[in-house]
Amino acid sequence: MNNPLLTKSTLPFGAPQFDKIENQHYIPAFKQAIEEGKAEVDAIVNSPETPTFKNTIEALEYAGETLNRISHIFYNLLEANTDEEMQNIAEEISPLTTEFSMYVRLNEGLFQRIKSVYDQRESLNLDAVEMRLLEKTYEGFARNGANLSPEDKETYSKYMEELSLLSLQFGKNVLAATNAFTLNLTDENDLIGLPDYVKEQAAEAAKNKNLTGWLFDLTAPSYVPFMKFSERRDLREKMYRQYNTRAFGGELDNSEIIKRIAELRIRVANILGYKNFAEYQTERRMAKSPAVVEEFLNKLLVPALPKAKQEVAELNAYAKAHGFTEGTIMPWDFSFYSEKLRAEKYDLSDEQLKPYFQLEACINAIFDLANRLHGITFSELSNIPVYHHDVKVYEVKDRDGSHLALFYADFFPRESKRGGAWMTEFRGQRIYNNIDERPLISIVTNFTKPTADTPSLITHDEFTTLLHEFGHALHGILTKGKYESMTGTNVDHDFVELPSQIMENWCYEPEYLNTFAKHYQTGETIPSDLIEKIVASMNFQSAYFHIRQLQFGILDMAWHTLTDILEEDALSFEKEVLSATNVLPSIPECIISTAFSHIFAGGYNAGYYSYKWAEVLAADGFSLFKEKGIFNQEVAASFRELLTKGDSVDAATLYRNFRGHDPEPEALLKQLGIIA
């Protein structure tokens, strides 16, 4: 069988051959790539030559290249365009890839060669990047079990294999649980309060399922506006309970899975010499320890909690003044009354703004912003195959016309795609044999699809999300380094969100919004008073949403600072952890953890705090743009320098080089209007 995953792509820029790849190709490709990778590792281990940086450290950097390329394709599509067969394939190959990872990481002969090079590092005349690769390679092996006894290595391997399978099962359950519930309304009276665009979208969804009426589900473009606008409190409650009990109970229950994941992570940490998994994870991040993370979260929590409670009290008073008679507002009331209060307070609503944020115009606007800041251009290509007809591909060129990257964009929800928004890559960047191999970057979102009558119109919040993911994309697009493992977004976990968080700031800048926000029907530029209202409302209920994010970080750290197996059930544990930070009534049977994909299937384990950490960096960093001008070329060039470096320079040093000082949490609290 001619396998397109195993043959070099003949497409421009080495793009993946999505038009030829079929599910049947994955397992044979993975198996062959693993054998190839093992042979490459064996060649390093069995080399008769004395270990050197080139024949050991660099050779290892390039080993397993085929497996790396196939994995990028498969696992990205598993998230963005999956089916049951792909999920079964993932379960079959997971033990194989984990076993390969252990074959490398726990390889005694390989580690001895690495250690030999590391021990003589001061006499090798390595440049700064080579030295960093050597140090990170040695530390990576030491931190992943290379110094363990043979018995402990075997145990560690079993833990890692089980963790890999459990994470897959967790994600599979969340996707299935999200897709399992729909609300099919056939009586127009049930739609009271919903704007036309929401009804049109729901009618289209019903039609696509051969149903009459209007169909709502738990994906963001459907769930979020329903909760904001529906006058039917009983239906809002139903939707809320369904969303917040996903993968909890029933055949898709994740509650025992997350307890087992937490237990295995404790065992992994212990066998490697750490008290808990958070201690292990944070050691090689900017934070360095769980204590620093907890102090950081507390610094952001204490001043914000009274303000958040005040915001909820204001919302309660508003609801009562507008006919609410049920005592206190519940979580399924929050978005509904929040939207009404925001509309009244600032005379502003999503319905007013959406006509000015046509997706196509927003895409062009972010390309224009990248051009104004960094001189790069985006041109849509029609000769590159895609994995789904919704996906678009662009070539990115630098200001001198040289090729920088391919950029894939996949914007609309479907049952084969998980919820949320993310940036990823099909190939990273590196310089190999003196050739700069440029990256293949992708962003995936779940924005409202166009209907027969209306183009895709997004909310201002969704435009913020678009800028956020595009910030990650720029990190991948602009990077330039020698080693793929140290380029692009391969940086400290609590640094990786800086480029994305800083980009969000432009969505509140009149000077930028004026350049593209035009009514999709009339072509009228967004009125200045609407922009003023967007800016004025920027910190509306900012303390509430700030606390909400902190709760995710606190919950994550609670799961990963456990030092013993959790005896109580997951729900009770979560309720206890969050009780002191709740500003709305806690619903007894609702739970975050069983669908908390970031920490149980998405790589943010003991790292969710990094969103807030990076928000602090971004608030402090953007103040330089505010001071010098939001399109200032000198500041943009300095920030691009940070983006190009990847992990070749320590993150704290990179930030200081850009900003001139270390950041303080106060910068974010001031930006959010929580402190003066």
Image: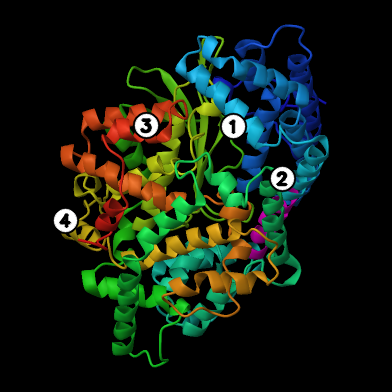
Type of secondary structure dominating the magenta stretch = helix
Q: Position of residue 442 (x, y in %)?
A: 51, 38
**Residue lying at 36% horizontally and 50% vertically, measured from the top left:** 615
Q: Circle 4 — which element?
A: helix
Residue corresponding to mark 1: 385
User: How far apart are the two marked residues, 3 and 1, measured between alpha carbons?
Assistant: 40 Å
State which mark lies toward you, 3 or 1: 3
Residue 323 in view of the camera: yes
State which mark lies toward you, 1 or 2: 2
Q: Position of residue 14 (x, y in %)?
A: 58, 22
Amino acid carrying mark 2 in the image: Ile
- Label 1–label 4 contact, CB within 8 A: no
State which mark lies toward you, 1 or 4: 4
- Of callouts 3 and 1, which one flags the residue occurring earlier in the amino acid sequence? 1
- Vertical comparison of 348 with 263: above or below: below
Amino acid carrying mark 4 in the image: Ser
Residue 213 in view of the camera: no
State which mark lies toward you, 2 or 4: 2
User: How far apart are the two marked residues, 1 and 2, measured between alpha carbons?
Assistant: 46 Å
- Vertical comparison of 310 with 291: above or below: below
Q: Which mark is residue 653?
A: 3
Q: Position of residue 394 (x, y in %)?
A: 46, 31
Category of crowding for the residue at label 1, using alpha-carbon neighbours closer than 10 angstroms: few (below 14), some (14–19), many (at least 20): some
Residue 56: quarter of image: top right
**Residue lying at 73% horizontally and 28% vertically, measured from the top left:** 104
Amino acid carrying mark 3 in the image: Thr
Q: Which residues are magenta?
A: 164-177
Category of crowding for the residue at label 2, using alpha-carbon neighbours closer than 10 angstroms: few (below 14), some (14–19), many (at least 20): some
Residue corresponding to mark 2: 271
Q: Circle 3 — which element?
A: helix
